[in-house]
Amino acid sequence: MSLRRVPAVLAVVLVASCTTQQPQPAPSAPPPVSTTSASPTPDPKALEKFTGQKLAWGPCTGSTDKAFDCAKLAVPLDYLKPGGETVSIGVLRHKTKKADLRIGSLVINPGGPGGSDVSAAARIAKSRPAAPLAARFDIVGFDPRGVGTSEPKLVCLTDPERDADRAEDSESDTTPGGIAKQLADAKAYAAKCVERTKHGQEMLANIGTRDVVRDLDVLRSALGDEKLTYLGFSYGTQIGTAYAEAYPDKVRALLLDGAVDPELDTAESLVTQMAGFQNTFTAFGRWCVAREDCALGRDAGGVTKAFQALVKPLITKPAPAGNRRLSFEDAITGTSAALYSQDAWKFLNDGFAELKRGSGKTLVALADSYYGREQDGRYTGILDVYFAVRCVDSTRITDRRVIDGAHERMLQGAPFLEGGTPDMSELDICSVWPAPATSEVHKPDIEGLPRPLVISTTDDPATPYASGVNLARDLKGALLTFEGAQHTVFLDGNACVDGAGVAYLIDGKLPAPETRCT
């Protein structure tokens, strides 16, 4: 699960530093693999009552900002049963004030799975880099099924259960007994998802990217757009790719930033991503040792060892963090969250220095941003949706030798994570998931698709640069390279990247081949 990180990470760290700024919930874990429908195609005639619906726009619940309006979109829970239960999709719109210049709607997905498109669209629509887009498009975000303002909401763990799970550090135990416990916990977790979610079993079977893409096309039609203009970050690139495969003739423009490699299965995507995190951690180490206040010492070759020496004692002795405790897994998670942007590296170094003094408050705050924990102790539920989508988006791996081999390769590629990683449980959970896979990994082969623009960052920890190269090749699109160490970059204030992306979305103008921005 991977989202645009900078506002979320910095907001949470600033809160930990006793400001009054509210954090933006944006947890982050690995992005899922590219998928396509493995089910029969729904009957368009039977879906007309959904594609022909008119959205009833009105004030957004809990907001006094008149720049936005909200609506609910009705879609089938199961697209092969259009007369059955329905799902309500929350939609937000920032309507352009220049009706004479309006091109249509620009639909945005910030990543995840499990991230709120409604919240992301609201933030982006009012950002300075997005002003040229807001002048030409209605900026639209929708919460995918199970997420945020959409109903029913996917529910697996209670807030206290999530806190307890984070504090347990069970993933650090790789003995046969520890692995057996992890599998038992995974089965219990899946059972709670079925039990606590409305239409539990059916919801889990129809929550994947296949169905989000179908919802997106219903939304396109309800918005009155003949063709879709779409901006996807991270996991949002997977949605964009799957939409292009399902509806290539209904695409106007497709900008994909922080690409998910369409040809990697779950195990390979995790192995690749862990190597990406190691590369970024190494870059952080070089930055850190050049500072006199580097909490991990001044030896670039010893940063990983120093980090391990600092956090491994937490396995048996968590550090106090206000009225909470910093576990080993939360230290790993908080570190990973901060690697998403160089803007957070100073706070990460401060967190390490703080831990050396015996407090884990900053690292807990960083981990909270990753997991979507609000200041009042409530969770957004993003991790539950993440696992539910991830586990039906690719053929699951049940062979224990393959799972254990993937775990070993993950740590070989990312030695700074030795002893555990926040994503090790994913293969275990998906191996016992109660809903069948609805998509499969494959090489996209699309005819009639307008050339998309793919943006890839050279030192992106969550979606490695090569993934963008591969996606641009597979979609026969243009590749824009950004030289930097962060996760996603479009509308982040880089004039080179933003100018190219805006020109593409508004005029369809692609950058010259091999364009690089710094």
Image (cartoon, rainbow, N blue to C red):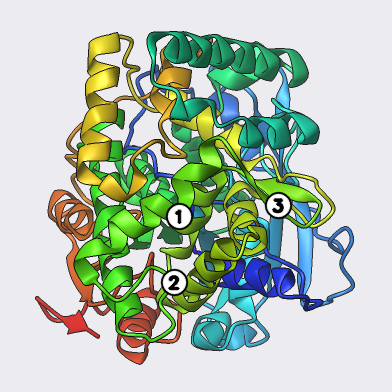
Q: Can residue 28 be seen in this view?
A: no
In the rendered view, would you say 442 is above or below 195?
below
Callout 1 secondary element = helix
Please give the label number shown on residue 310: 1
Residue 504 occupies quadrant: bottom left
Residue 506 place in picture, x, y as percent: 40, 79
Relative to residue 172, is residue 88 drawn left or right?
right
Relative to residue 264, is residue 178 drawn left or right?
right
Mark 2 or mark 3: name the one nearer the start of the chain.
Answer: 2
Are the two marked residues, 2 and 3, in contact with CB atoms closer than 8 angstroms?
Answer: no
Please give the label number shown on residue 320: 3
Q: Is residue 276 visible?
A: yes
Residue 350 occupies quadrant: bottom right
Please give the label number shown on residue 278: none
- The kind of residue on which mark 1 rests is Leu
Are the two marked residues, 2 and 1, in contact with CB atoms closer than 8 angstroms?
Answer: yes
Please give the label number shown on residue 295: 2
| Residue closest to the eye, 306 or 84 | 306
